[in-house]
Amino acid sequence: MAARSDRRAFIAAAGAGALALAVPPAAAALDRKKGADEPGALSALITAELHAAYAYERAGRPDLARHEDEHAKALASLLDALGRPIPAAPSSPEQLGPAAAAAAGGGRRAAVELEQALIDGCRRRIADVGDPNMVRTVATIMAGHAQHLVVLRETADNEK
Amino acid sequence: MVGTISRRALLAAGAGSALAVAACGAPEEPPPDAELLAPSLAAALALAAAYERRGDRTLAAREREHAARLRAAGARAGAPAPVASGAGAEPLLALERAAMRAHLDAAGRVRDLRTRTLAADLLSDAAQHESTLLARLHRDPLPTAFPDGREV
């Protein structure tokens, strides 16, 4: 429980840190006009990353959980720069979406499906952000999930 | 423990975000998408040739497919190709990372949303090849949460 509270506090603080260090004109430079729904896209992606981090933590995959946490943190900084609230991290398994709930059980196939769902989410949402820095952040997060996917698949193949 | 975050890490995260945001600066009009995709095409062709030379027909075909998708999206030919020499997987890793940097740059700057998705797809594909090559080299296949083609 303490770990989950820490994660929420960390993500909120990371956003606050970005605001404190990046002066308002920098945030104002974000090119919001091009993005169809930047806050909506960022919120959805943060929620997905937080759920994945929670799932991997329960599944005993701290390496993947740490990456998902870092993704959530980076996205939270961007959302905070837009002046929007940061979604809360899940506090119980019952709050997880279907893919994350399945992955929390520790199965490799479920983890593969979770990573594919995260890739699909990034791919869908990348059209909803307009600022080049946001686009690149979402693109590198998508690439990170693609790497998780190939490593999980190769590990599964080796276990056959 | 994933949730335990040090003050140092927090400050680093905040500073990184701040730099990323501040780096935006005043928006400039980017070149046409065809120009922005040109380095991606050159990288894909260089990788196809490199994998072909090493007898990896699967990845060579994959890179030729990337090149075809880039041409279909209007990528201009003739950009300088990345170069990497040597034996083994290291030069391939260097070429994949050059491709990743090209795809990422294009993703952030192209105007057309389908082209943006294409660049993100190609970045993901190249990132997977990077992981595979790192594993072949007995190195961590997941060295960073944000694979962007830079040395980690």
Image (cartoon, rainbow, N blue to C red):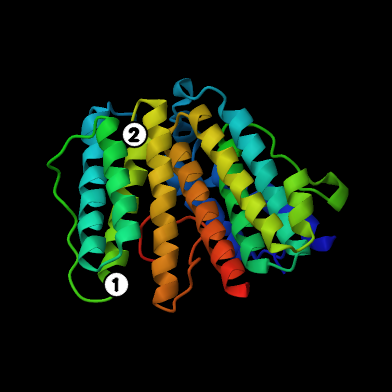
Find residue A19 and report its horizontal and vertical position in percent.
Answer: 56, 41
Outermost residue to the bottom: B138
Which one is nearer the viewer's eye here, A13 or B144? B144
Q: Mark 1 points at which residue?
A: B90
Q: How far apart are marks 2 and 1 (CA)?
A: 29 Å
Q: Find residue A64 and report its image quarter.
A: bottom right
**Residue A107 position (above or below residue A15):** below
Q: Find residue A65 and report its image quarter.
A: bottom right
Q: Is residue A33 left or right of residue A88?
A: left
Q: Mark 2 points at which residue?
A: B109
Quadrant housing the N terminus of chain B: bottom right
Q: What residue type is labelled 1?
A: Glu
Q: In this view, does B69 lie to the left or right of B132?
A: left
Tell me the crowding category of disc 2: few under 14, some 14 to 19, or many 20 or more residues within 10 angstroms, Cα based: many
Question: Can see residue B82?
Answer: yes
Q: Which amino acid does label 2 sit on?
A: Arg
